[in-house]
Image (spheres, rainbow, N blue to C red):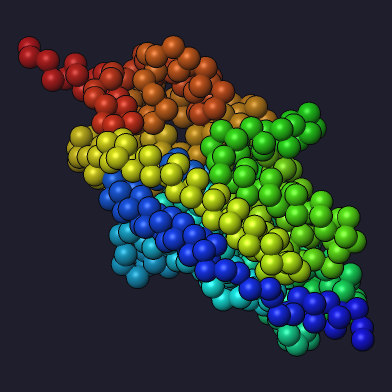
Amino acid sequence: MSTATRYASESHSSPVGVGAGPRVFLCTAVAIIVVITAVRSWIWWRNDAGISFASGVMITMGADLKNGAFYRPLFGPAGYGGTRYLPLYFCLHALLLKLGMPVLASAYLLSTAAIILLIFGTFRLLRELGVEAWLAACSALMLLAASSVQLSLTTPQADGLAAALNVWGLAAIVSQPRNGRKVFFAALLFTLAWSAKVTTVFGVAAAFIWLIATGYKRLAGLLAAETLCGYLVVTGATVVASRGRVVDIFKACAAGGADWKFILSGPMRMESMAVYTDPVLVGFAFLALLVLVFLLFSSNLLRSLPALFWITTLIITAVIFGSPGTAANHLLDMQVASVILLAAWVAQAASPMRRQLGVGVLALLTVVAAISLSRHVQTWSRWYHPHQFHRVVEAVGPTSKPILAENAIIPVIAGQQPYVIDPWMVQLLRTHIPGFQEPLLERLRNQDFSAVVLTSGNIAENGAQGWFDNNAFGPGFVAALKDHYRFAQVIDNDWIYLPKSEATQQKPN
């Protein structure tokens, strides 16, 4: 019997049964998570609570494409471009917009579809790994226990879609019989995952190592070659469709201003971000680390696809956090990899005690997550008010002049093309391109904007100038805003400033 055949036999061997108590405990805990997720999602969708400035960037790119602009230049007549996103997600969003869907409703539909696809993909992968249907289903839904997955559901970005395609690629690789057709399908899925999020390469890396370790060297080489060809096709098509603009954009923006010292701090930044924003994920990841140590001592590490997937995900995610501006949404993949590793290990447990203990621990961790999420249900409805962005647009009023907003979703809702897609990129690129922010400052001085809407706070507050100088728009922005615009009103988190000349014109003679 070959190594590959023996491994497949071991992975799909009859599992040891689990008693009714642990099974009911886990199913109940997962059901609670699902209910809380539904309540939370309804509140956030109804209030537009998850439309962060990063979501605004992604939505704006979809709106730009719907209007015929694919990767606007770093600076041009329409204003400032600059982004590190690959095109699949915003192309899908542009398609929904072309079909006539509202901007925010289409964004929520896409993010929800991505998480549903991720859950079903995780279920499919676990079933291919020999996990029973009930445990695979509970584990797939257990993904919702992490704040990063909850965030991806209600905050439209590409993370959920990339993770879903990545997991489906792994499911294609592990399914029997393994042949060139399955490898081609997996390579296609891995390519699509990469075209949604440029850092999503850990799935194909884990699959490549696992195929070699289990005796499928020819298929491993085929997977690497076909996936690389897929990357090149996507890159070539993107360069051609953008008329070469994407090359200049990624050359300027891809590193995000990182240096070697910052890159080396990635693991520590990742840890602190996880502890602060997603402690439940830390629990899952710690348990997965213990399983990894067990596999290491049992000499089964390289023959375990879930273990390899967890390792490659950990390494690449740590590298991602070595780039400035990396946020908690990038932790989603660690939750996916941790749940897959834990579920596969529990399913393959040789002793009834280890198996029942594993199910019980997963259930307990899910209950902890449910308690943590449930504490915020009431506060969620108080933090935000319905139609916040629409109220901001109404407050500004009808205008032929552009609205400058820290969150680009506001001018999009107003039917405009945002002058600045990503304020963070403006302050970054001005360090490499002399005078890059001068056109923006000149427009402020000329009061060319009908309104300026800031999300990070009132410029009169302590520390506000430092924030905008170092994180949004760049030096000189606050001074120009103070000199030529006045504070008008605040709506939830949005501070609205109007031109001072309008106030002068309204004064009686």
State the count of labels.
0
Answer left or right for 119 relative to 128: left
- Image coordinates for residue 177, horizontal then vertical, percent: 75, 87
Query: Does residue 125 appear to the left or right of 447 in the view shown?
Result: right
Q: Name the residue rendered at 39%, 14% in the picture.
A: 461
Identify the residue shown where x is 92% and y is 86%. Answer: 1
Residue 395: image x %, image y %? Answer: 20, 34
Quadrant location of residue 333?
bottom right
Residue 252 in view, yes or no: no
Name the residue rendered at 13%, 20% in the picture.
506
**In front of the other: 314 or 249:** 314
Which image quarter: residue 128? bottom right
Residue 134 x, y percent position in the rendering: 54, 73
Who is closer to the viewer here, 460 or 270?
270
Q: Is residue 422 visible?
A: yes
Q: Is residue 264 left or right of residue 255?
A: right
For the C terminus, the image quarter is top left
The residue under the point 19% across, 16% down is 504
Q: Position of residue 367 (x, y in %)?
A: 48, 50
Vertical position of residue 347 compared to residue 283: above or below: below
Q: Nearer the viewer, residue 419 or 93?
A: 93
Residue most toward the left? Answer: 509
